[in-house]
């Protein structure tokens, strides 16, 4: 009865496990991406997001890094990593094989997304540490070998060791010699001893060979000292660069922009002032429409409800805002009116030269909106495949809401309407807003 019960329990358990596995396989097979997320597929295929999920490709952190990004983030480690990889093969062990695989996969993933430079950083530090360790070992060994008195002491120690070994071997041979010395036939032990002596040369010869090898591999004393000092200076320079990068590049707030010129430091506080205006001049229940980049900031600093923000998972909501920005003024007003939007926030940097404005992000709005609403087509906003806002821009581009809200009354600033970011005069300078009003 016990065997029957065990068989029954095992059979039922296996059946349940197989059923669960079958359901999981069916769910994965029914998924268009076979269970992989969009970010995971972007890692395996860097072109996947730009082809099928533009919302992922539109995030700046998901863009491939440029060469200056590597030199900015890891600096001198970019030159030490190859040396560390070579050092891992001398000799190759399980631990060094892991380090090689770690740095290889980290370099690949960091080349797909700039945010994965965080994955490359520890691997680069480990590999560079191995390279520096090997370099210090060679240089200090060369200096130590060539210092006065070191070589002679080594030879004396080797001689003493060899003499002691020879005396021990002689004593052993004497001890093993049989009492009847008249017989010339050697014993098995003596044959084994002779064979060991033939295979293992005397310690004195071995010590001399090692000393000669060290002498041939040793670098000149002056070169070793200079190289050692240069490595120390290189490490100090890397520390200074890391402190500067942490203080200037990664600690500056994204709300307040700063720039340096001949006149000194200039501070642009436009973001904070815009959010302060929304907080002081709008009703608490008013809704604000903007691109999702500014959603968190608007919610936190202006305390107003937004349509989309950085945590919006519904692609249709983001596509709706992108479609409104890409549509003519009346169609955009109807979309925002259906969403109960009272204010529209746009960021424009053509006057001060701020490149991360909404005009530069506009094509992503078109692509994301066109992915849900087919009447929005990217070629309608391009002239011969080029994105232009000058006199050669397409009528669709010149009449869309984003263009009008960004360049409204822009000609009044300098009389030419010159965009410092795009480095050209805009195509449509004089127009009026019929469904939207500029706040003051």
Image (cartoon, rainbow, N blue to C red):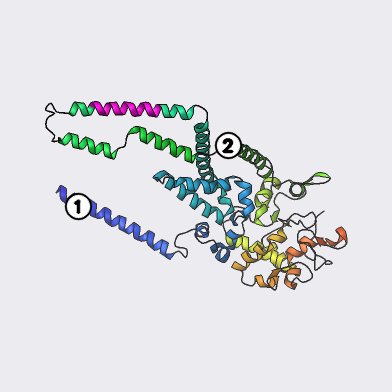
Q: Residues within 10 Å of mark 1 (few under 14, many from 20)?
A: few
The residue carrying mark 1 is 7
In the picture provided, is 351 more to the left or to the right than 190? Answer: right
User: What residue is shown at x 22% (from left), y 35% (from top)?
Assistant: 193
Residue at (19% x, 26% y) in the render:
175
Against 36, residue 121 (above or below) is above
Residue in front for this viewpoint, 10 or 108 = 108
| Main secondary structure type of the part rendered in magenta | helix
Whether residue 363 sits left or right of residue 266 in the image: it is left
Could you tell me which secondary element the residue under label 1 belongs to? helix
Viewer can see residue 321: yes
C-alpha span from label 2 to label 1: 71 Å
Write down the region rendered in magenta.
157-171
Judge depth for marks 2 and 1 and give the one in front. 2
**Residue at 20% of width from left, 37% of height from top?**
192
**Is residue 437 rendered to the left or right of residue 361?**
right
């Amino acid at each position: 009865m016990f065997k029957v019960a065990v068989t029954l329990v095992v059979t039922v358990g296996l059946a349940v496990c197989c059923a669960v596995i079958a359901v999981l396989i069916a769910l994965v097979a029914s998924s268009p991406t076979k269970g992989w997320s969009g970010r995971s597929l972007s890692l395996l295929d860097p072109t996947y997001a730009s082809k099928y999920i533009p919302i992922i490709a539109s995030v700046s952190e998901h863009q491939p890094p440029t060469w200056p990004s590597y030199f900015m983030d890891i600096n001198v480690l970019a030159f030490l990593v190859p040396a560390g990889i070579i050092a891992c093969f001398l000799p190759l062990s399980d631990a060094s094989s892991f380090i090689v695989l770690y740095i290889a996969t980290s370099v690949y993933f960091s080349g797909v997304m700039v945010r994965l430079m965080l994955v490359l950083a520890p691997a680069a530090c480990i590999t560079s540490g191995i390279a520096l360790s090997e370099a210090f070992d060679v240089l200090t060994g060369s200096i130590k070998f060539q210092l006065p008195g070191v070589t002679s002491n080594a030879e004396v120690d080797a001689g003493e060791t060899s003499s002691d070994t020879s005396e021990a071997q002689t004593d052993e041979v004497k001890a093993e010699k049989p009492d009847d010395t008249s017989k010339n036939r050697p014993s098995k032990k003596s044959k084994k001893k002779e064979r060991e002596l033939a295979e293992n040369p005397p310690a004195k010869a071995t010590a001399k060979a090692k000393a000669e090898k060290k002498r041939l591999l040793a670098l000149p004393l002056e070169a070793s000292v200079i190289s050692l000092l240069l490595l120390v200076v290189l490490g100090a320079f890397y520390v200074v660069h890391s402190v500067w990068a942490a203080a200037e590049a990664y600690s500056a707030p994204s709300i307040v922009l700063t720039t340096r010129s001949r006149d000194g430091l200039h501070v642009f506080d436009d973001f904070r002032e815009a959010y302060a205006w929304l907080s002081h001049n709008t009703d608490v229940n008013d809704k604000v429409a903007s691109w999702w980049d500014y959603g968190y900031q608007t919610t936190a600093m202006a305390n107003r409800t937004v349509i989309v923000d950085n945590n919006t998972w519904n692609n249709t909501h983001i596509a709706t805002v992108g479609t409104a920005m890409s549509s003519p003024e009346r169609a955009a007003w109807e979309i925002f009116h259906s969403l109960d939007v009272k204010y529209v926030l746009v960021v424009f940097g053509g006057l001060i030269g701020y490149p991360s404005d909404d005009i530069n992000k506009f094509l992503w709005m078109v692509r994301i909106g066109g992915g849900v609403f087919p009447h929005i087509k990217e070629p309608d906003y391009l002239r011969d495949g080029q994105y232009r806002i000058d006199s050669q821009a397409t009528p669709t581009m010149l009449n869309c809401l984003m263009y009008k809200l960004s360049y409204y009354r822009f000609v009044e600033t300098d009389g030419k309407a010159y965009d410092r970011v795009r480095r050209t005069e805009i195509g449509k300078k004089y127009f009026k807003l019929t469904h939207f009003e500029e706040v003051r």
